Image (cartoon, rainbow, N blue to C red):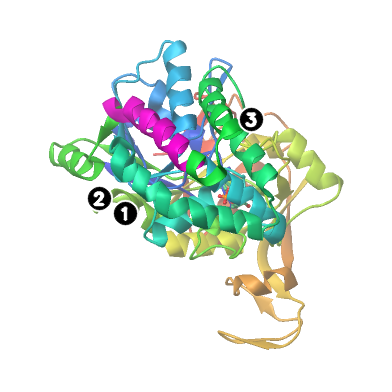
Amino acid sequence: MIPSWLAPTCAIIGGQWGDEGKGKIIDFLASQFDVVVRATGGNNAGHTVFIKDQKHVFHLLPSSMLMPKKVNIIADGVVIDPVVLLEEIENIRTHGFPVESLFISINAHVVFPFHRILDAAQESQQNIGTTGRGIGPCYTDRVARRGISVMMLLDKHALGIALMNMLPEKIALLRHSGYDEETIRRSFSTFTPENALTKSILDKIRAALDTGPLLETLIWTLTEVYHELGMRLLPFITNTTIFINELYGRGKRILFEGAQGTFLDVCHGTYPYVTSSHPTVGGIIAGTGFNHLYQTLLVFKAYTTRVGAGPFVTELTGLMGETLRNAGNEYGATTGRPRRCGWYDAVMARHAALINGSTIAILTKLDVLSSLERIFVCIGYKYTGPVVVADKKYEPGMELLTMPPSSLLHHCTPILREFPGWQCPISHVKTYQELPADAKAYIKKLEELSGLTFKIISVGKERDETIIRS
Ligand code: IMP
């Protein structure tokens, strides 16, 4: 049954640093929608869905791919690594799920091997803690107006010219990062993990690089290989902007699947420790060309995690952090990296609500806190740095209830409030009323502090371990 508060077009956006459990929520809500659209990011995302104890991780495919009768769309704002996408499609197919319902934007941009290689090279200088999937360098090319779109993969001549214009600069950048010719050759020969699907691609690149001069060989081979990959994607390619707007015109209910989280937004996040796209609601509109979005649902974990480097005010580095990591199985779905863990941060939550214009939210992984005797929530920050005059005057000892500029965050410590834990399992609970009193008190406080109402509360990883409020 469709809850009365759920709008016919709705975006699911991460309220923290990604990994809020959006995959499960999208999978859960998708039954109420006809169309699911992925609008931003690339295969840096990892959305985990459990169905009957079987784990499915999607990096590029919308999380609704396993549901019958859905239209699944990868829109213009996404950057697509065709090797990864074709692998995911093949994987779904071999598990017996239909793939004909998938549509890919002609205007999405393509992640090439040199994007991944550059990501690794730049990472060794910048230490952002990226996923190493080439996302930043690909978006950089797009913004610099020299990127290669899905459309261009289909036109071998145009693709060859684009690569001819692009590759000398990429090689120069790699050399500038200290890569010699041998390392560059090796990097292109091993840019993706070798498996049944990627072997033929890697073999082609290796064979060519074994004999030919570096630049010419790369231009020629990547043109051949990526044109072929583009042709394999052709059955799925369409103008998704027109298609989504048409579907809306036909009265279809549309769910927009956010990737990453608000504080990884290149404009609004903890810059420079962010991704290179807009995981906030603005990214959904820019990334689809659709502007009839009625609702934005923000997703928050009942605590906070982040992967990669950057400030994290409520981080718990000791035993408590380890306890949360183990209880919540907090390891990256894309890279397997252990996630940094900390308490729920209401300053971040209020800011996320502001940026995304949300009043309704979703709380996930509440069950992870079930064994704790005491739970803490960050209600404000104490500034401990030097005097800085910025949007206001920051002085040591000052209490902050709103987000300071991200460069000052590492000078902030959390002001914590303590709550009693409920200390009993809750994954079987089906209604809000049945939750233990202390769990309800915790949720109520988070709502008050964040200015949000949690309409869905996830109490376990399975689809049916989800409480929905009227
Ligand atoms: P990139 O998106 O790979 O460039 O990584 C930039 C930052 O965003 C790093 O801190 C990554 O760990 C983080 N990041 C990117 N994608 C995700 C995600 O899906 N979940 C959580 N963190 C992410």
Q: Quadrant of the N terminus?
A: top left
Cα gap from disc 2 to disc 3, whole angstroms: 39 Å
Q: Is residue 329 left or right of residue 142?
A: right
Give the magenta range.
218-235
Residue at 28% x, 51% y is 294
Asked if residue 227 can be seen in this view, the reply is yes
Asked if residue 75 can be seen in this view, the reply is no
Identify the element where label 1 is drawn: helix
Question: Closer to the camera, 49 or 184?
Answer: 184
Residue at 41% x, 21% y is 66
Identify the element where label 3 is drawn: loop
The residue at which mark 1 appears reads as 285
Q: Dot 1: within a 10 Å radius of its alpha carbon, few (fewer than 14), some, or many (20 or more) residues?
A: some
Q: Is residue 231 magenta?
A: yes
- From the image, state whether disc 1 or disc 3 is nearer to you: 1
Rendered position, 354 above or below 16: below
Cα gap from disc 1 to disc 2, whole angstroms: 6 Å
Please identify the quarter of the rendering in which residue 230 is found. Answer: top left
Q: Amino acid at mark 2?
A: Phe
Cα gap from disc 1 to disc 3, whole angstroms: 37 Å
Please identify the quarter of the rendering in which residue 235 is found. Answer: top left
Q: Quadrant of the C terminus?
A: top left
Q: Dot 2: within a 10 Å radius of its alpha carbon, few (fewer than 14), some, or many (20 or more) residues?
A: some
Q: Amino acid at mark 3?
A: Ile
The residue at which mark 3 appears reads as 426
The residue at which mark 2 appears reads as 290
Q: Amino acid at mark 1?
A: Ile
Q: At which x and y percent is residue 407?
A: 65, 73
The yes-or-no answer for disc 2 within 8 Å of ligand 1 is no
